[in-house]
Image (tube, helix red, strand yellow):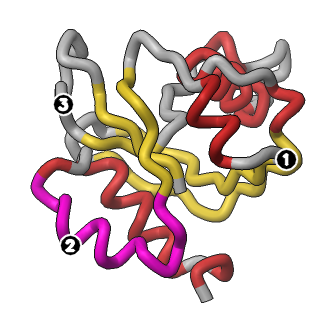
Amino acid sequence: MVFAKRADNITEYPGFLELVPSGSIDKECADAKGVVDYRSKLLSEFGEETSLSKEYVKRISGFAFVLDINHNVYEICCEILLETEKELVAQKFSSKEYNAPVFIATNNLDNFVKSNVASIVPTSMALIEAYRQSKWAK
């Protein structure tokens, strides 16, 4: 999993850790029939927040919806499988919204969360819980 610290100039949760990428889906994500292409939006956010091209993305798999009770919106939880090494991601990572990425192996997730629970964005905590309940965590 990739977390990054939110920049100090961000309005909500500055300095907190958040799963990357993160973003919202708006009416511009829907086609004329109202069908939402969340994968395209996710790829756009991925590029914007990491400075990596979408060619690094091997697969996007949605696995849950999470209600953000603070903003009364649903989050789409996805696993993004990259076709590259974490060293390259760290080297190329550049963002106005985030500082340097932190890579957490799934077998270290519980320790990471326990050590950082007070500084993780609540929505990311909900996404982590959804992940723990998914087939990928088993």
Dot 1: element: loop
SS label for mark 2: helix
Front residue of 40/113: it is 113
Q: Amino acid at mark 3?
A: Gly
Asked if the residue under mark 1 is in contact with the one under mark 3, i.e. CB atoms within 8 Å, the reply is: no
The amino acid at mark 2 is Lys
Q: Which residue is mark 1?
A: 83
Query: Mark number for residue 114?
Result: 2
Q: Residue 72: which quarter of the image?
A: top left
Please state the extent of the stretch shown in magenta in the rendering. Answer: 104-118
- Distance between the Cα atoms at labels 2 and 1? 29 Å
What type of secondary structure mainly makes up the magenta span? helix
Q: In what element is the residue under mark 3?
A: loop
Task: Compare residues 37 and 84 and report the one nearer the observer.
Answer: 84
Mark 1 belongs to which amino acid?
Glu
Pointer 3 residue: 15
In x, y percent, where is residue 40? 78, 26
